[in-house]
Image: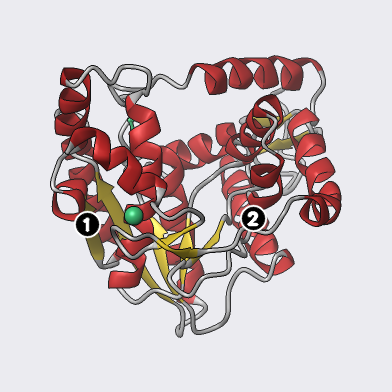
Amino acid sequence: MNAAVCSACKTKEAFFYRQYSGERLCKKCFTQSIEAKVRATITRYHMLNFDDHLAVAVSGGKDSLSLLHILAKLKRSRPKTNLTAVTVDEGIKGYRDEALDIAATNCKQLDIPHYIVSFKELYGFTLDEMIFRAREKGQTELTACAYCGVLRRKAINAGARQVKADKIATAHTLDDEVQTVLMNIFHGDIARLAKEKPVTTEVHPLFVQKIKPFCEIPEKESALYAYVKKITFQDTPCPYASEALRNDIRGMLNRMEEKHAGTKFTVFKALERLRPALEETAKKEDFKVCVECGEPSALVLCKACELLGHVR
Ligand code: SF4
Ligand code: ZN
């Protein structure tokens, strides 16, 4: 039997079968389809103004580097769009150091400025030091990811402000978004469910708006894009990776997708339709500034400062 032909160009040999759409694509048509999809997402959600300065959150993994390469390509046709890659250095020995080098190499190759914000400089401790101290003080119920997640969100916002970016682009994929939807449902967190969206609308002048141009790209395809484009990325997992519930949900969603192609898109779109109603229901958070650090916070003391209190 002959190898299948690409359903887009009808000439080259297909190497990828997109189960949810039935397309078979050659390498070139596959990468073009990803780039076109990202452009369409950016347009649909009005993510970019023509002269925006974007801080691209680059961890050094496949998703963030695929995003950086696609945005760099996009920039060539939008000369007024500015990009700066921002990497958070949490201070995870043997892991983040490697990622920083990989991120720097990609930025150099793409001629994009690279800015690093470190936990050590911002908070006085690396994540390794925080976890060591928290354990020493008998604080055991919070995982490293619980600290890291909160402190990283704050760091990326600070980094984006430091480089004077208008927006932050993150590489959350369709998989990340749908996992988060289900996690929020399992936690019963309706406020979060309403809040997590392709373009954030948190109202405080100190919050830099976040956009997610990969929210309609399955993680598998973002990885495949990196492979086909021969992008160098970090492949080793974080030594602290421990989000048990997310891992269970990831497994469940992947099994569902395998059996019922298109499941992830269906959940994503269902939430998009539900969101206006959710936003009506969820009470609006009233942001003040944290008494400790002066960053926006719904409470008197922000979550980051509360966590840092455990280790100081
Ligand atoms: Fe931080 Fe956890 Fe991610 Fe490691 S796995 S970088 S600790 S959130
Ligand atoms: Zn604070």
Residue 39 can be seen in this image: yes
Counting from the top left corner in percent of width and height, residue 159 is at 30, 63
Residue corresponding to mark 1: 116
Image-based side of 112 in relation to 186, left or right: left
Q: Amino acid at mark 2?
A: Pro
Assign the C terminus to one quadrant of the image.
top left
Q: Quick one: 10 or 287, which is closer to the camera? A: 287
Report, in whole angstroms, how far the alpha carbon at label 1 lies from the one at label 2.
Answer: 24 Å
| Callout 1 crowding tier (Cα within 10 Å): few <14, some 14–19, many ≥20 | some
| Image height of 11 relative to 92, above or below | below
In the rendered view of the protein, which quadrant contains the N terminus? top right
Residue type (three-letter) at the residue carrying disc 1: Ile
- How far across and how far down the image is residue 118, in percent? 20, 51
Query: Where is mark 2, residue-wise?
Result: 198
Residue at the image position 51 percent from the left and 80 percent from the top: 78
Which residue is drawn at the image coordinates 41% and 56% (left, top)?
68
